[in-house]
Amino acid sequence: QMELLAPKHIKKWLDKSAVNMKTSLGNDGKLSRPQITRLGGLIAFVGGRTPYKKILDDLTSNGFLVQSGNGFELTSSGQSELNRLTAMAGLRPEHYADTNL
């Protein structure tokens, strides 16, 4: 393991910061944990990946994705939810969208 070569006061600050680090999305109250999970599932989907089963079940049961052939399709309410959650999280489409969409 590599040792951090920094003055003691910097090492102390870094150690303390690492303990207190949390995602700003969940920590600052902008998005709840279920919203973060849902956003992750929607971003995974638009990025061409299949979300984990539990997340996929949430997305389909809430009408954000529908079965289409051998896969799924984003519904208009799914697109609205994606837009709403990304806006709340302070993200822009270029942060998560596949440029081929």
Image: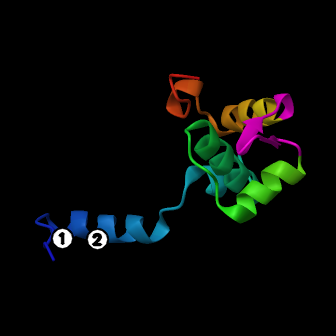
Task: Please state the extent of the stretch shown in magenta in the rendering.
Answer: 63-77
Q: Is residue 24 left or right of residue 1?
A: right
Q: Which mark is residue 8?
A: 1
Give me the C-alpha separation between circle 2 and circle 1: 6 Å
Residue 76 sits inside the magenta stretch: yes
- In the image, residue 52 above or below residue 64: below
Numbered mark located on residue 59 in the image: none
* Residue under the point 82% across and 41% down: 64
Q: Amino acid at mark 1?
A: Lys
Q: Residue at x 59, y 46 (%)?
A: 44
Which quarter of the rendered picture does the N terminus lie within? bottom left
Instruction: State how many labels appear.
Output: 2
- Name the kind of residue labelled 2 in the image: Lys
Q: Is residue 68 shown in magenta? A: yes
Quadrant of residue 2 within the rendered picture: bottom left
Viewer-proximal residue among 68 and 88? 68
